Amino acid sequence: MNRAAWEEKPTAAGRAGKALSIAVIMLLILFPLYTIALTSLSSAETVQRVGGLVVWPSDGVSFDAYEQMFRNPVVLDALVVSLGVTAFGTLLSVLVSILGAYSLSRPGSLGHKTILFSVLLMFVIFPGLIPVYLWVSALGLRDNYLAIILPMAVSAFNVVVLRAFFMNIPQELFDSARIDGAGEFRILWRIVAPLSKAPIAVVTLFYAVAYWNNWFNAFLYLDDTSKWPLALVLRTYVVESAPLPQASGLESAPPTLAVKMAIVVVAIVPALIIYPFVQKHFKKGVIIGAVKG
Amino acid sequence: MGEDRAARTFNLNRRTLLRSASAAAVVAGAAGCAELDESGDGTAAGTDELADLLPKNIPYEAGLEPDLPGSADGTVSPGFLARPAEVTEAVTEAPMTTGEEITAITPLWNPTPPGLPDNSYFTAVNEALGGTVRFNIADGNNYTEKITTTLASGDVPDMFQIPGWEIIKLSDFTEAAKELFADLSPYIAGDKVADYPLLANYPTDAWAMGVFGGTLLGVPWEREPYEIGMFARLDTLEGMDLAMPTNLQELLERAEEVNDPAANRWAIGSIDEAVQQAMGAPTLWRVEGGELVHKFETEEFAAAIEYIRGLFEKDLVHPDYVADKFTNAKELIGSGQAVFYEDGLGAWHEMQGTYAGVEGFQLWPLDPMAPDADGTPFMWRGDPAGMFTFIRKDLSEERVEECLRVANWCSAPFGTREWDLVWDGVEGVHFEVDDDGVPQRTELGQTEVANTYLFLSGRSNANFKFQYSGLVEGYHAWQEKAAQYLDDHPFQGLRVEMPSDMAAENEPMKDMYHEIYRGQRDMSEWEGMVADWREKAGDAAREYYTEVAEENGRL
């Protein structure tokens, strides 16, 4: 009778309750996604008739919204730009963050305190829009893809997360590697990085999503629309209809709700695709057993 | 050599950086802090004392004769009932002659078009201009950041479109603008403007708005001076055999008659300022016994709150708007869930276009309203210019003239080839004229045409949406009625930058009276709120505005 609660066999009511609450939570998450997807697949007439998001599938499926969106060649170009920027940017960011976090996790590295302090400082102080703009302009990066990568290449938060993880790796592992004659780089790539797959995966996801979604830097620094990433181009569809007259003939109808929702779908699909691959790392206790062996 | 160039660019940029440091300091103070203690002269300018700076108004008469004549002061726009069989050419010589490119930053509220050289629309217009205008297009909804950063860097384009609603958010815009943008008076003041006949066509009041701190800097975007109106689904009313309400009393009666929540039809989709206007609260200030009185302080404003509270209390307002004052009432009207709503007048043809597919859809503005059958209607008077195009200061005289010629070209009125190019592109390529004489964009036009050239100048007001049955005549008649009731407020024709303290209190006050509408606060609290407002910002603002009014002989 002294068994703890979790040792009891669950009652039917308990299980039902659990199932119900999980179902409700799932519904809360899935329902908005479902209406977004459904609305994006509805015709303009349907959306107009219901006067908002479509909840019940009634008039069949229409790909009008997606067609309208991708008819603009700018959208396809932007997709390529976004993929490139996200891939290159994430690679750069992860690499720099790992290197930075590793050196900051080793006491006595060059300029340790100063660099650590300046990284931590970024938590509380953001330099502000105009100074960053002036700095990027002064470096001659306007209209250059680097302008949308470098300003967000390193996130202090991610560096600190990685550093904290690296510092928890048992000292014995470093000692034994060193006895075997490994240098810092070899320790980092052969011991630390493989042990840190989980946080690295998470940080990679953070960076990738940030690059994918970021439109603001492109808005500021890229004058040439052909260099715009998808997030910025798609934004111009989602914004409220113009306060000014448009075409003098047909009021080229402001993008319908269906198009807006199609954009939301396009924007979240990559994250949905990557997530399952990264997710398994979220729950793995990678470090367990490392010392025993 | 590559490195060399990089180094040079860096130096150049650094120099720009230093040179622009003062401009940066001016703007970096971030959004919205025109200081209260500043005297009026930096921020306000009156038509009276500035007549010398402004171009003479020379109406452009070579163009198409309107079917319904407009008024010279811009309160009634010329109405056109059909597209002319032949469009004429307003400007015969290509405006760009130096062979250099013009760079321009303009906002856009439409999907991004392809850029040069892949955009046949830009190419075609540039060809007509005789040179290349290279646009840096920025999302109009985030334009503030584009402006602040660009002004701070000091690296402004040759032509820069800045809307008035952005200018009021920028601290000390006038100082920065004077440093960065060209004084236009030497080119167009008085009779000199005759060289730019289409710019001369803009009303003097509109030009006066382009004066910043005693210097004419901006080419104005003329606008009709109406701020807001009440609209109704005419088809719904007619279907029920109900007449359009002509005053607030009737609006309430009609609202009760059409309201049918069980059938998912509510009387009101949105309502706020249109009632304040109809009650007779001033646009902003009015003079009472030699003193300025703010609209919040008037009985009419309180009466408007009480009236709207009544509508909410009787459940005549759509629940979406009750829940959120930012609800998109257009959708409620379009789907027939609401019958009345308030909007800017430009919404009329936009809504007719958006909901063209809804059977019988007929939107119509209510005539200017008074509180009841005995009262006199009242209309707020908005600024006669809404946006401004600035020209870079350190350009040579020849280049400034070239930019002005481009602005002149882009100002061509309805019925000209230039108007077509600016609005829809090339006939047969970007648009086709349909059987009703309405330009309809081709697929290419829909992708490539973006009205960025429109923002290189203002454009002449015109009432030309003849494709919607009765709209041109209806709007013309509406303007003729409304013009006589326009508020003759003490700051008419003056550019006055609202002090930031006062601007900062606008939203909180709005939140509060919206809470009264919704019964979350009691009407009896209003007086106390106004007293608080006076203390926080109102009295100081009154002093500031009084000074401006006195300087311009308005008090």
Image: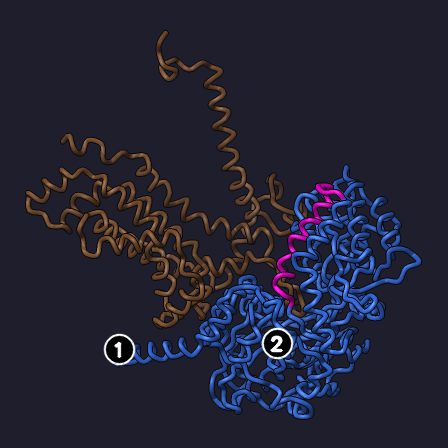
Chain colours: A brown, B blue
- In the displayed structure, B72 sits above or below A139; it is below
The residue pinned by badge 2 equals B42
Q: Main secondary structure of the magenta part?
A: helix
B340 in magenta: no
> Quick check: can you spot residue A119?
yes
* Spot occupied by residue A231 in the image (x, y as percentages of width and height): 46, 57
Let me know if marks 2 and 1 both belong to one chain: yes
Chain assignment, label 1 = B
Q: Earlier in the sequence, mark 2 or mark 1?
A: 1
Secondary structure beneath dot 2 equals helix
> Seen in the image, is A129 located left or right of residue A190?
right
* Spot occupied by residue A236 in the image (x, y as percentages of width and height): 53, 60
Q: Of B27 and A236, which appears nearest the observer? A: B27
How many neighbours does mark 1 have within 10 angstroms: few (below 14), some (14-19), or many (20 or more)? few
Label drawn at residue B498? none
Q: Which residues are magenta?
A: B498-522
Q: Give the number of callouts.
A: 2
- In the displayed structure, A24 sits above or below B299; it is above
Residue B447, quarter of picture = bottom right
Report the residue that reaches farthest toward the top. A1
Q: Is the N terminus of chain B in the top left, top right, bottom left or bottom right quadrant?
A: bottom left
The residue pinned by badge 1 equals B3
- Please state which amino acid type lies under the numbered disc 2: Gly
Secondary structure beneath dot 1 equals helix
Q: Of A99 and B50, which appears nearest the observer? A: B50
